Image: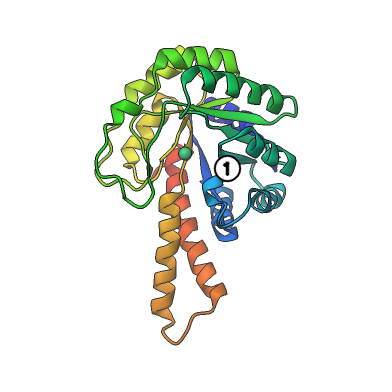
């Protein structure tokens, strides 16, 4: 069943868990995430990021995710990840997305606040939830970044208090040491940032981006500190790629594409099952 982010964040707060936000740039990845969530009976966020526009448009990805959400046996939010302009946000709302992220985190604080406040006003008028971002996270999709100082990107807890109060966002992505993409070295996470932002914002649901590749212990600590949504995709996609390598080895005479797609789906589903068990407070 289709729901919005606000409802899922309420569920996450009540159960002290994090809801997984998974990108669905292909039918296989969206189905793999949904099948895993259904197997565990856990709510799910399917999302589209503009960075995936070369593979699939916001509109087509949205329609596919909405169709999957409508027939799902668990609550599913269809969310725009990293909306970079009011126009992109409006395209998502018109398509039927139930939640949008408006990311002006690269802009000066006052501009981020005023633009986000306006997006929240418009989105809430049609029952669409809003996630925003404060602080910033570097990108390392293909391991191009070798060294960086995570402290330069940290969210300032006092800023978060004012930002939350004046924008009315439903969830806030914060920066405490995670990176988008692949980690070259063990990340240095500052969990105290999560605790302080949570305290300063009166318990606003907090979001972790760059959720691939952390240790199980790091996920659990982050959730215990107040993270309620975790974006996870890179390692799921890499698992799908490995599934195809295995299928190629298994069929040396030639591989049908639908068999390759099935192998990728199965591998991604296994990866998502493992991670959802951690996000949901379960075991391995
Ligand atoms: Zn992100």
**Residue 225 location, x and y as percent?**
39, 24
Q: Is mark 1 within 8 Å of ligand 1?
A: no
Q: Is residue 55 visible?
A: yes
48 versus 159 height, above or below: below
Occupied quadrant, residue 188: top left
Q: Residues within 10 Å of mark 1 (few under 14, many from 20)?
A: many
**Residue 101 location, x and y as percent?**
57, 34
152 versus 21 height, above or below: above
Report the residue at 59% width, 23% height from top: 115
Q: Is residue 190 visible?
A: no
57 versus 214 height, above or below: below
The residue where tag 1 is placed is: 44
Q: Would residue 23 appear left or right of 100 to someone viewing this image?
A: left
114 versus 130 height, above or below: above
**Residue 122 location, x and y as percent?**
71, 25
Residue placed most toward the observer, 119 or 255? 119
Tell me the quadrant of the picture where the N terminus can be found. top right
Colour setting: rainbow
Report the residue at 36% width, 39% height from top: 179
SS for callout 1: strand
Residue placed most toward the observer, 110 or 167? 110
Report the residue at 27% width, 36% height from top: 148
Occupied quadrant, residue 189: top left
Q: Would residue 189 appear left or right of 247 to someone viewing this image?
A: left
**Residue 99 location, x and y as percent?**
64, 35
Residue placed most toward the observer, 65 or 122? 122
Report the residue at 69% width, 36% height from top: 90
């Amino acid at each position: 069943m289709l729901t919005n982010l606000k409802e899922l964040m309420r569920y996450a707060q009540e159960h002290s868990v994090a809801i997984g936000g998974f990108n669905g740039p292909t039918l296989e990845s969206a189905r793999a995430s949904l099948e895993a969530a259904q197997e565990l009976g856990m709510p799910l966020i399917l999302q589209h990021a503009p960075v995936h526009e070369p593979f699939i448009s916001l509109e087509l990805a949205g329609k596919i995710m909405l169709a999957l959400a409508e027939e799902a046996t668990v609550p599913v939010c269809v969310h725009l990840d990293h909306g970079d302009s009011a126009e992109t946000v409006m395209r998502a709302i018109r398509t039927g997305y139930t939640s949008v992220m408006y990311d002006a985190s690269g802009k000066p604080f006052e501009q981020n606040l005023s633009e986000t406040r306006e997006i929240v006003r418009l989105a809430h008028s049609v029952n669409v939830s809003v996630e925003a971002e404060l602080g910033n996270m570097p990108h390392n999709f293909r391991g191009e970044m070798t060294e960086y100082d995570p402290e330069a990107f940290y969210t300032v807890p006092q800023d978060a208090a004012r930002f939350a109060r004046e924008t009315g966002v439903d969830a806030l992505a914060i920066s405490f040491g995670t990176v988008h993409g692949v980690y070259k070295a063990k990340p240095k996470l500052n969990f105290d940032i999560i605790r302080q932002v949570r305290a300063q914002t009166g318990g606003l649901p907090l979001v972790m981006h760059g959720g691939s590749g952390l240790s199980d212990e790091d996920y659990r600590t982050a959730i215990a500190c107040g993270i309620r949504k975790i974006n996870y995709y890179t390692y799921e996609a890499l698992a799908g790629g490995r599934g195809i390598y295995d299928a190629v080895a298994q069929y040396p005479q030639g591989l049908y594409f639908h068999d390759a797609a099935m192998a990728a789906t199965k591998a991604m589903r296994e990866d998502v099952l493992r991670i959802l068990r951690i996000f949901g407070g379960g075991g391995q």
